[in-house]
Amino acid sequence: MTEEAEPAAVALPDLVREVVTPAAAAEILERTRLHGCNPRKLDSSHARRLARDMCNGSWDDYNPDVLSLCSHGAAIQGQHRLEAVIISKTPRSFLVARNVPHRAATTMDCGKARSAATALSLVVVDRHRKDISSTIRLLQNYDVERDKVAWPAWRSVVYTNAEIVRFFQSKYSDLPDFLPLMTAMKSGVYSSPAASLTCAYLVHRDGGSTSHADNFFQGLISGGHLDTADPRWITRRYFHSPARPRRGNITSALHLGLLLKTWNLWVTGQTWEIANFRATQRMPDIVSADAPCPQQANQALRKPSKDGPVIPRRRAAARAAVPGQTMGMMHLPTEEGFPV
Ligand SMILES: [Zn+2]
């Protein structure tokens, strides 16, 4: 090691723990704009996500990430946190470094971002963490965003790692119990891991009857002894088609919609001619096996003209018996556009 590279000789800035009020944060950001000290564009949706963490207890005040201010008193690191302080209207403590040279920003925030899957490892999720974190996103969209955001737009709903961990701990901590079923569906049905795990979870949570759920998944996964009028048979044919969508960030929501529609049809004794779930359709509510009253069934299968015909099973059997016909009529969305 050469003399000038001696680490002890390099002066790091002193850190001081400071409480930053919304007013102080606004002043720092104003100086940042005035002097043009931070070429990084402020991403307001990222700031809003951090503010959400700050408002709902997901922000960790032990986080020692430094707020770096230059000689102008402008933020060269930490502008999103400052914006989040303003949005959340709550003072927050940070470790603050002052008089940091502008050039130091060259090497800031170049670290490898931590994934939600890694964050889950800290709350003792020890396997399939990536699938579980994707599933938590899908479940949260299903449970909370379903009535606000159309399912093709779920990809634009972003959660912070802290939120994923909080959702897991407060609502979905029993998700790992359904991992064996996810693995079986992945290899038997070819549905995406997150759609498989979400479907397994939701049908057991909202489907009303464990024995019905077991029966449903057994047939769906194995395909054994299904007649051609069984909605599971038709759904399996969709997933087994080489043209099925496999990639893309809305594939899981699409697969989930198909799987939930299959459950609803099966549990109400109905079927479909072709497996379809279009961009204009609503993500279905799950019909309970305990009380599939006609009203609930109708609600789950509403707008039959748009959703494709809902037909009693016997008639469907006759139609599906025409070989090749259903395959050609399948509504297979492409990556870019969906059939409407
Ligand atoms: Zn500056």
Image (tube, helix red, strand yellow):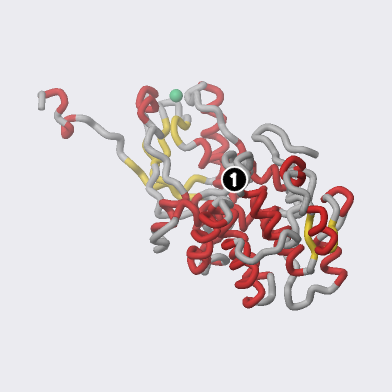
The residue positioned 86% from the left and 71% from the top of the image is 294
Tag 1: amino acid: Val
Left or right of 320, for residue 189: left
What residue is shown with label 1? 158
The front one of 237 and 19 is: 237
| Residue 94 x/y as whole percent | 43, 46
* Residue 48 appears in the figure: yes
Rendered position, 256 above or below 38: below
| Residue 269 x/y as whole percent | 79, 68
Q: Quadrant of the C terminus?
A: top right
The residue positioned 14% from the left and 29% from the top of the image is 6
| Residue 120 x/y as whole percent | 44, 57
The residue positioned 42% from the left and 45% from the top of the image is 114
Other residues around mark 1 within 10 Å, as few (<14) / some (14–19) / many (≥20): few
| Residue 243 x/y as whole percent | 63, 39
Q: Quadrant of the N terminus?
A: top left
The front one of 66 and 205 is: 205
